[in-house]
Image: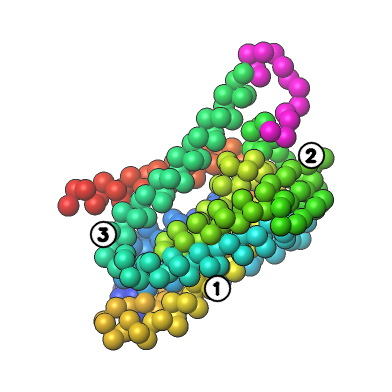
Amino acid sequence: MIGTYFPTSGVETAWWLPPLVACVVSFFTSMAGVSGAFLLLPFQMSILGFTSPAVTPTNLMFNVVAIPSGVYRYLREGRLLWPLAAIVVAGTVPGVLIGGYLRLEFLPDPRLFKVFVGCVLLLIALRMVWHLVGRFMVTRAVSLAGNAAAPTDSDPRSVLDQEPDGPVEILAFNWRHLRFRFQGRSYSASSVGIFLLAVVVGVIGGAYGIGGGAIMAPVFVSMFGLPIHAVAGAALMGTFVTSVVGVTFFQLVAPAYAQQGIAVAPDWQLGLLLGLGGVVGMYLGARCQRFVPAVWLKLMLTAVIFFVAGRYLMGFWSH
């Protein structure tokens, strides 16, 4: 079979493969408020052989094209938490610019970048495992005590096992805290805490090519105790805005690095194909989210992340 050649990235593959993979990946990950870019980057590097710095903005292009369909679905259902999205954007935008600079200046080597990717994925997976173990221990304790009472707001069961019926109601929003109501329960988080963490996440996401906001969904659940069905839309919205900034940054600095023979500008054709597949996957994933318990989504994502992280780290040390 003769594949399609993409001159910017040097990739040759069947034209239908990138959008198909992007559709399948984003269908599952968008249910948890994650775009799927963190899994598409290993696909581009390991399967397609796209290892130049240009893979980072190309991966961000996927977010730019694909995310609006998922955000639109969450908006229609009244589950787009605008204040939370605003905090994420405010923190991750400067972080993404810093991360993009670090990627170009300190992580141009594909092997070193794979180690960086593996470490980021491993940290995400370990945090998700920590939260799942906490949920299991609480559920087991309640079961042994014979207490079938409804879970409290601080109970991990209330974060992972809700059915997303009804919209999100904003109760208060200022520079100190954000409070909202979802399914009859009130939730609160520090605006400053989310902002500072978003800056750090933005640096990682900008270098990794996932926009920064993608990492925030697991953080919202595991560190701030927020319900995943209520924050998924905000996480995707934050990822979209920061990805636009990231793509613009790499495109603007590309001429300076072209003189050094380094490909920095995104592969627009490949990024568009990935994005088109993601449009379909994200819309369907956002629509089907209400039928899938969040705990199963997190278990699936954790297993996949551990596999990819392990492969990258072991691959580096085996050379």
Q: In this view, does 15 lie to the left or right of 132?
A: left
List x then y, in percent, for residue 162. Answer: 70, 38
Furthest residue to the left? 319
List x then y, in percent, for residue 112. Answer: 28, 59
Q: Is the magenta stretch mostly helix, strand or loop?
A: loop
Q: Which amino acid does label 3 sit on?
A: Arg
Q: In this view, does 226 lie to the left or right of 250?
A: right
| 159 falls in the magenta region | no
Q: Which residue is drawn at 62% across and 18% down?
A: 141
Q: Element type at marker 1?
A: helix
- In the picture, residue 185 is in which quadrant? top right
Q: Read off the residue under disc 1.
A: 244
Query: Would you say residue 148 is visible in this rendering?
Result: yes
Alpha carbon distance from label 1 to label 2: 34 Å
**Between 150 and 289, the one nearer to me in the picture:** 150
Picture disc at residue 29 = none
* Upstream in sequence: badge 3 or badge 2: 3
Instruction: Please provide the residue range marked out in magenta.
Output: 142-154
Q: Read off the residue under disc 2.
A: 185
Alpha carbon distance from label 3 to label 2: 47 Å
Q: In this view, does 84 lie to the left or right of 114?
A: right
Q: In this view, does 222 lie above or below 243?
A: above
Q: Residue at x 35, y 84 (%)?
A: 256
Q: Read off the residue under disc 3.
A: 111
Q: Element type at marker 2?
A: strand
**Between 227 and 190, the one nearer to me in the picture:** 190
Q: Which residue is drawn at 68% across and 33% down?
A: 154
Query: Would you say residue 60 is visible in this rendering?
Result: no
Q: Element type at marker 3?
A: helix
